[in-house]
Image (cartoon, rainbow, N blue to C red):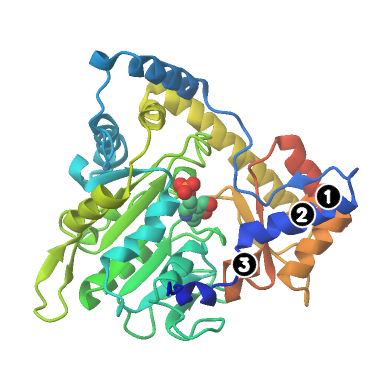
């Protein structure tokens, strides 16, 4: 008899973004004339940068010439991209990372979900709350978290990020083995400065814990005291895996590319002997078996982002989205709304009116303002009472959406 993996049954059968899409579709069926503005999806609205389009065309042409085309990219990614990442992302920040420590992926979600395969099932986990749902769900699926059904999960340490603590994660109250951090934070927009992140790295060093560090929104950082990589912090290479993405900066949503850094110095202990095992070797082994890597064309698209033209074009996009976010932020604040974000991230974390749940406010905005947002509760229990509005739309749509919300 084939037995099902019952851990899946502990997940809510409503994946946040699928549930939002379902409710939006129901609205569209009932109101076919309504013009909706989508500030829920984190898909960027602008098309690919010209430099990316050119690089991709060139890559396709290269693939037609076997002698000119190097297909040794395999599961870890092509050298040209891993070397470009070292040169452009890490060296300028005084961080020494080797290409062999970098793994190219199809966007960081897959690796964030898969990385937990490297650690034992008995590890305890801590997730910031609210958080990108993948951190917790991927642990539930393998039976490490929420081993008893229930929400919130009794065997997970939720690091509550609320208005009272300025949405800043506080160090775990009980010992924990694995910590998921996101900086700048999605969905609250809160930031960990270098000094604040240092406390987490020191905690992990002292408690022999691992940090899975999600820096998906790193390109949007504006404040000088916010680190662009966790490896700016001394000792981090012994405790942290870092995840980075190109999908929300250069419009590579459908091209799909990102990367994960697993330092050679990162180790975890064997249960019985306490011998230390290198995580890089295990991750390489895992990828060799389970990953097909990322297409050559996608990796050439990512590489060109480090050219002078690529940088300029990406900066234009980031500036555009950040200006959207600033305009929305200022207008909503001036009208008396409570919110965070919009200054170092391209989205706002907006408090719902007193006593209104996040799904109710989602519905209110959808039906009365014709604007799609994301209900905060979908990011975790502490997301109740908030919705997220992203700035990945045209200037006109962002402005119109805010005015419409204010009138609703
Ligand atoms: N991490 C965070 C915080 C995100 O918001 C997202 C996407 O929404 C991801 C990771 C996934 O990024 P990618 O498109 O690279 O898979």
The residue pinned by badge 2 equals 24
Left or right of 1, for residue 31: right
Q: Earlier in the sequence, mark 3 or mark 1?
A: 1
SS category of the residue bearing label 3: helix
Is the residue 401 above or below the residue 15 in the image? Answer: above
Question: For residue 311, which quarter of the picture?
Answer: top left
For the C terminus, give its image quadrant.
bottom right
Q: Tell me if label 2 and label 1 are in contact, CB under 8 Å.
A: yes
Instruction: Look at the image and tell me whether residue 115 can be seen.
Output: yes
Relative placement, left or right, of 60 versus 13 is left
> In the rendering, at what x and y percent does residue 22 appear?
72, 57
Residue shown at the point (31%, 83%) measured from the top left: 175
Q: Position of residue 347 (x, y in %)?
A: 61, 51
Q: Is disc 2 surrounded by few (<14), some (14 to 19) or many (20+) residues within 10 Å? A: many
Residue at 20%, 58% in the rendered image: 282
- Depth-wise, is mark 2 or mark 3 nearer the camera? 2
- The answer to whether the residue bearing label 2 lies less than 8 angstroms from the nearest atom of ligand 1 is no
Q: Residue at x 45, y 43 (%)?
A: 219
Q: Which residue was labeled with disc 1?
A: 28
Residue 378's mark? 3
**Label annotation for residue 50:** none
Alpha carbon separation for disc pair 3 and 1? 22 Å
Quick check: 263 left or right of 50? left
* Crowdedness near tag 3: few (<14), some (14–19) or many (≥20) residues, C-alpha within 10 Å: many
Q: Is residue 346 left or right of residue 219?
A: right
């Amino acid at each position: 008899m084939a037995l099902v993996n019952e851990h899946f049954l502990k997940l809510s059968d409503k994946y946040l973004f699928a549930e939002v899409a379902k409710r939006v579709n129901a609205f569209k069926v009932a109101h076919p004339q309504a013009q909706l503005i989508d500030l829920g999806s984190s898909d960027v609205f602008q098309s690919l940068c010209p430099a990316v389009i050119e690089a991709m065309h060139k890559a396709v042409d290269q693939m037609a010439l076997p002698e000119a085309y190097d297909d040794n990219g395999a599961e870890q990614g092509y050298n040209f991209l891993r070397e470009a990442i070292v040169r452009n992302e890490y060296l300028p920040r005084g961080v020494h990372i080797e290409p062999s420590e970098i793994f190219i992926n199809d966007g960081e979600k897959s690796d964030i979900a898969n990385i937990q395969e490297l650690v034992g099932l008995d590890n305890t986990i801590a997730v910031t709350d609210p958080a990108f749902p993948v951190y917790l769900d991927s642990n539930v699926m393998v039976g490490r978290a929420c081993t008893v059904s229930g929400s919130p999960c009794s065997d997970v340490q939720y690091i509550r990020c609320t208005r009272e603590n300025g949405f800043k994660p506080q160090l775990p109250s009980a010992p924990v083995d694995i910590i998921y951090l996101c900086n700048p934070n999605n969905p609250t927009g809160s930031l960990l400065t270098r000094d604040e992140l240092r406390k987490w790295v020191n905690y992990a060093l002292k408690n022999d814990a691992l940090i899975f560090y999600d820096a998906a929104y790193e390109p949007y950082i504006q404040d000088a005291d916010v680190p662009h990589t966790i490896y700016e912090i001394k000792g981090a290479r012994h405790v942290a895996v870092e995840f980075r993405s190109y999908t929300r900066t250069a419009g590579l949503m459908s091209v799909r590319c990102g990367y994960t850094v697993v330092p050679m110095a990162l180790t975890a202990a064997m249960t019985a002997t306490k011998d230390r095992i290198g995580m890089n070797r295990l991750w390489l082994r895992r990828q060799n078996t389970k990953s097909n890597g990322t297409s050559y064309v996608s990796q050439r698209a990512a590489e060109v982002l480090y050219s002078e033209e690529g940088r300029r074009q990406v900066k234009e996009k980031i500036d555009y989205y950040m200006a959207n976010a600033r305009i929305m932020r200022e207008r909503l604040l001036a009208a008396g709304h409570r919110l965070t974000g919009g200054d170092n991230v391209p989205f706002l974390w907006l408090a719902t009116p007193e006593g209104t749940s996040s799904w109710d406010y989602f519905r209110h905005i959808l039906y009365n303002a014709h604007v799609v947002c994301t209900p905060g509760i979908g990011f975790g229990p502490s997301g109740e009472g908030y919705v997220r509005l992203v700035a990945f739309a045209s200037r006109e749509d962002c402005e119109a959406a805010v005015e419409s919300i204010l009138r609703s």
